[in-house]
Image: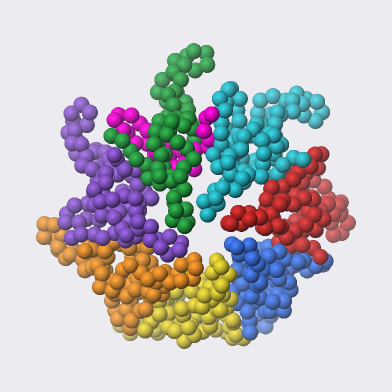
Chain colours: A purple, B orange, C yellow, D blue, E red, F cyan, G green
């Protein structure tokens, strides 16, 4: 299964969490802090302007992005993997 | 009975829930988690822009769509079947 | 008495409730569930755009419409009959 | 004293309440239900559009209008008579 | 001291309260009901439109105006006299 | 240190509080009522319009201004002196 | 790692807190008041206007800026250093 996001939405795969915390303790479950970083897997066609025109997004497939704390609330499960779908406005920046 | 949605509204038939959970236990009633996925049955003419022009929707009849957790709250019963009517902005993406 | 709605407002006569529930029990009073469907009796001239122009409504007199759960809160009594007055944006679609 | 409403505001004289309820009981004080209907006594010049132009109102002096339940909260007392001043958007329709 | 209001703001001197209530009792302090009427002492240059142009106000110095119940909350004391400063949108109409 | 405010922001030095109240009692601490008046020390380049153009502010350096009760909440300390930074829309008028 | 902020976002390094308070007491932990001042490390391409055009930001890399009390809530950790990412509208002014 594959998702083609609508308009200004973006599908992001959250960066894998480090399995060890400082000091080398192995974390599991909710004790692992979810990093607000990930890779863009798919982008929508663009944002609809008041004029009805479409403005292409600034992020591209493959970009590593940083996003807001609450951006990760809408998740979809694709082939058993949890992905995040968010508006581009929830993305703070691109890791360069 | 058939519904012709107004403007940017879309009629969606929710995807049938899997009758078995992982491990093969048969679920029933509220124990079944409603999937946020479905098929588009009808689409409105389009979104009215500030200029008064109509912008056709991006989703089409037959599309499999993923939508937000709260998009399913407005339901209509057509010939005994519960369908969802939502704005296109509540649709995250199209399953490709 | 007759009402000529202003701008994008619409007067709707709620569809008569079925007097029998499944199983043939006759319902009365608040036990009857009000259906969110009705017939359009009158429509306003249209919605005022930002430009000041009027955009005619999509619904017409005689249309059978489906509307939101809370659209029915503004009622007017005309010749002893309770009618609903709502904005066109509260109408989900037209029954075809 | 006379009031000239500004822009899209309208002065309405509430319709006199029926002194008898069904069954002929004479009502008094708060027991009388205030009808949401009245006569337009004065109208503003029109609504200011984004462009700065004025769009004349749809209601006219002498119109019998129906208005929302909460439209009557701003009252002014002119020559001992309580009148309502409301925005035209609070008026549902014109009684024809 | 004199105040030149900015943009769409207006300085209003509240109408002096009647010293006697119906029946001739002399009122004092908080027992006196503040009338929502007053005289315009100064007006701003006008409202800034989206285009950046200025639209002159409809009220003029010397107008007797009626205003909303909560319009009087911003007061300034000029030469020992309490004046009200409000947006023109808080003025309902002009007493003619 | 000096602050150059951005866009429609303005730096204001609050007017020194009168040290004596009516009757000549010397006030101190929180008993002193902060006057909502001050002098403009710096102004931004102007307000950005929807079109992207900049509209210069109406207030100028040196103006004595009156502002709202809550306008003073954003303070910056410059060379040990507490200054207020506010949007021009929080300024009611200019003392002439 | 480096962050390229999107649109009107700005990356700011908070100014190091003074280690001694007035009187020379050394502060630690939460007793240290975080100054709302910092240096701009990176700026987005600009703000998207309604027309879809991009308006470049007013702040530049290297600017010392003053920002609002709540602007510092979105932090990102880059190479072990906590940086703030904020919209340009949260910046009050530039220290000159």
Q: Percent position (x, y) of residue E72?
A: 71, 50
Quarter occupied by the N terminus of chain A: bottom left
Residue B93, quarter of the rendered image: bottom left
- Side (left or right) of C63 relative to E86: left
Quarter occupied by the C terminus of chain A: top left
Q: Is residue D78 above or below residue F72?
A: below
- Side (left or right) of G63 relative to B44: right
Q: Is residue B25 visible?
A: yes
Which residue is at the front of the view, C18 or F46?
F46
Residue F65, quarter of the rendered image: top right
State the extent of the magenta-drawn residues as a range.
G69-96
Residue furthest top in the image: G24
Q: Percent position (x, y) of residue C55?
A: 52, 75
Q: Is residue G78 magenta?
A: yes
- Side (left or right) of B18 relative to C90: left
Q: Is residue C42 magenta?
A: no
Q: Is residue E72 visible?
A: no
Which residue is at the front of the view, D61 or B80?
D61
Which residue is at the front of the view, B64 or F22?
B64
Q: Percent position (x, y) of residue G95?
A: 52, 30
Q: Residue drawn 53% across and 73% down?
A: C47
Q: Residue drawn 31% across and 49% down?
A: A59
Q: Residue drawn 16% across and 65% down?
A: B19
Residue furthest right in the image: E24
């Amino acid at each position: 299964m594959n998702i083609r996001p609508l308009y200004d939405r973006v599908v992001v795969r959250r960066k894998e969490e480090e399995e060890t915390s400082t000091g080398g303790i192995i974390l599991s479950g909710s004790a692992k802090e979810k990093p607000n970083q990930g890779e863009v897997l798919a982008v929508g066609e663009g944002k609809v302007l008041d004029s009805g025109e479409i403005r292409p997004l600034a992020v591209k497939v493959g970009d590593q992005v940083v996003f807001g704390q609450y951006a990760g609330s809408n998740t979809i499960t694709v082939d058993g993997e949890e992905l995040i779908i968010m508006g581009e406005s929830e993305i703070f920046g691109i890791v360069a």
